[in-house]
Image (cartoon, rainbow, N blue to C red):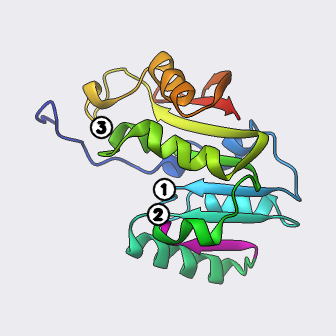
């Protein structure tokens, strides 16, 4: 498939590429935690997170109203009641500052049109001291899917964006030849 260098190529979702349970197995999860799924899309990770945190809560948000509505439908079908889906405009009234134990931001920073540090500052604001953020991104390798290579972040670039948002680097894990995960701590 031929594309222009600045054109993103439609791709499979993360859940179609990597088993969400494999990702969850690498996170410091506990069943009672309060978690956030920022820019959650249709909930590829939200639903597995909600199943795992059966005594906790998952706060999921996305800019797309259609994605939020589809996620709410999927949550109703799976009978999960421990997830709050909200509009990011309502974040300050939905998620208390310093309340979340952990957060996930999957495949979003590379495609953000707004400030990457500002996005991670939103996440940091919601996290408790010592809380973790799992940032999943595309590798900077040749691929037919995902954002253009010049839009993708290297591990070092992602860690720098995290530091600008007040995080410290914890660890990096390769999820596949296409994706990696950086764990940040508040």
As drawn, 144 above or below 46: above
Q: Which circle marks residue 39 in the picture?
A: 1
Residue 120 visible here: yes
| Category of crowding for the residue at label 3, using alpha-carbon neighbours closer than 10 angstroms: few (below 14), some (14–19), many (at least 20) | many
Image quarter hosting the C terminus? top right
State if disc 2 and disc 1 touch (CB < 8 Å).
Answer: yes
Q: Which circle marks residue 62 in the picture?
A: 2
Helix, strand or loop for disc 3: loop
116 or 73: nearer the viewer: 116
Helix, strand or loop for disc 1: loop
What residue is rendered at 33% in x and 42% in y?
111
Q: Find residue 166 and report its horizontal and vertical position in percent.
A: 61, 32
Q: Which circle marks residue 1 in the picture?
A: none
What residue is rendered at 29% in x and 45% in y?
113
User: Sequence-wise, which precedes: disc 1 or disc 2?
Assistant: 1
Q: Specify whether residue 153 is painted magenta.
A: no
Helix, strand or loop for disc 2: loop
As drawn, 114 above or below 72: above
- Residue under circle 3? 147
What residue is rendered at 59% in x and 48% in y?
123
The span from disc 3 to disc 1 (Cα, nearest Å) is: 16 Å
Quadrant of res 33: bottom right
166 or 55: nearer the viewer: 166
Q: Report the magenta residues as a range.
A: 82-88
């Amino acid at each position: 498939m031929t594309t222009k260098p600045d054109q993103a190529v439609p791709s499979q979702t993360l859940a179609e590429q990597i088993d969400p349970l494999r990702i969850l197995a690498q996170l410091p999860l506990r069943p009672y935690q309060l978690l956030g799924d920022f820019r959650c899309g249709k909930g590829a990770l939200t639903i597995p997170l909600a199943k795992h945190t059966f005594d906790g809560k998952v706060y999921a948000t996305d800019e797309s109203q259609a994605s939020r509505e589809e996620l709410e439908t999927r949550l109703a079908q799976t009978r999960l009641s421990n997830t709050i889906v909200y509009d990011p405009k309502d974040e300050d009234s939905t998620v208390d500052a310093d309340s979340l134990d952990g957060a996930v931001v999957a495949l979003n920073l590379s495609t953000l049109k707004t400030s990457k540090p500002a996005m991670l500052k939103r996440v940091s604001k919601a996290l408790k001291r010592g809380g973790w953020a799992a940032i999943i991104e595309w590798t900077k390798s040749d691929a037919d899917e995902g954002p253009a290579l010049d839009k993708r972040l290297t591990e070092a670039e992602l860690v720098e964006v995290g530091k600008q948002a007040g995080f410290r680097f914890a660890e990096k894990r390769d999820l596949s030849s296409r994706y990696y995960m950086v764990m940040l701590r508040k």
